[in-house]
Amino acid sequence: MLETNRLRIIPLNPEQFALFLNGTHLMEDALGLAPSNETIDKYTRQAMACQYQLAAKHPEDFLLLTSWQIVLKSENKTIGSACFKNLPDTDGSIEIGYGIYAPYWNQGYMSEALKALCKWVFTHEGVQSVIAETEKDNIASQCVLQKCKMKQFKESANRIWWKLNKRTMEKNKIIIIRQETEQDRQTLYHLIQTAFQTAKVADGDEQDFTVRLWKSENYIPELGLVAELDGKLIGHILLTRMYVIQEDGSKFESLLVAPLSVLLEHRDQGVGSALMEEGLRRGREMGYKAAFLCGDPNYYHRFGFKSISEFGLTNPEIPEPYVMGYELVPGALDEVTGVAKLV
């Protein structure tokens, strides 16, 4: 997922792309988005079906060839999409196609999304330029490409082709959210340690606690995420498996959010929110119904977390205000009772 000031740009996985072809609302439901009430026309559906087939033929490059949904953060709603139409050719060129829904025209959203996507694609080996095609009378689309610093390099009677070279790519502060790797861990250890030195709620052991979680059977690789800016790791979130021990002795499987770390110089820029939103979205997509954490109530309430006492749950080891829960599926904790075990 890519993050800009106003947008989240989400690449569809194969299952989500297939849903998209069968109905925009199906894809939106799978992503936990508000309904856009938009439909794609017959021509666009045919084009996207061909794109899906191309991506399926190259599973190792599916992320490069998939459809990217452009989501307006303030509405949690998809407002358009984009895709790279081909693998890099012998010259390292790759073509981008895009579209924005009419109610969101002329507000700069498409330019914002294309800048992020171009910067992302230039991190791929072999990509040296991004090209786009517009009709000669489509002035709005041409303005979008000009704002992205693309230059006209070819034209026909009815069409214009544009190009952006890697070396002239404008520097933008685009945050990339991706899954952590084992190679990240040494950097993340120090990032977490540094971040919690200035946190309002901390016990000084967060970096070692994270190491224990990485080694535990409750570790879920897909739910360890990093925020990367210009190749530097600036934030991290880890969601691992935990349980509510119910009064009858049964276990209600949930997620533990711990820790969430953002370097001091990058706070108040939406990094923590981007990590939290993507982590919870992925957890919901994987079938989890609730998440819990320990932290600063003033910060985590903004994401919808509430004291576990409001769900009728307890934790005898940590004072009540600091232990919070969140329903990934509304009503998921209605019939759950007992102790939320955070460790």
Image (tube, rainbow, N blue to C red):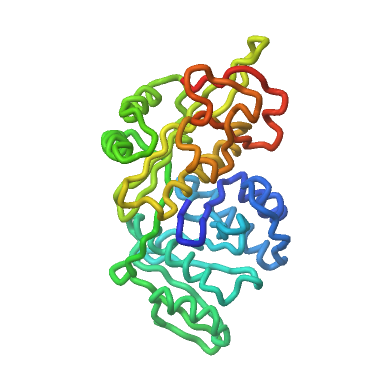
Residue with the most extreme bottom position: 157
**Residue 61 shows up from this direction:** yes
**Side of 243 relative to 127 (left or right):** right
**Which residue lies at the image location 63% right of the left edge and 35% below the top edge?**
327
Residue 184 in sight from this viewpoint: no
Identify the image quadrant of residue 193: top left
Residue, far top? 249
x and y, in percent, of residue 68 in the image: 54, 57
Residue at point 49%, 76% (across, down): 144
User: Residue 318 versus residue 29: which sits nearer the camera?
Assistant: 318
Left or right: where 95 falls relative to 16: left
Res 183 quadrant in image: top left
The answer to whether residue 234 is above or below residue 36 is: above
User: What is the number of callouts on the image?
Assistant: 0
Q: Nearer the viewer, residue 123 or 46?
A: 123
- In-image side of 322 versus 27 (left or right): left
- The percent position of residue 34, horizontal first and vertical second, equals 67, 53
Where residue 274 sits: x, y (%)? Answer: 47, 49
Q: Residue at x 39, y 47 (%)?
A: 227
Task: Tell me the residue at 46%/76% (across/down).
Answer: 145
Q: Position of residue 195 (x, y in %)?
A: 31, 40
Q: In which quadrant of the rendered view does residue 191 lie?
A: top left
Give the vertical position of 72 relative to 60 (above or below).
Answer: below
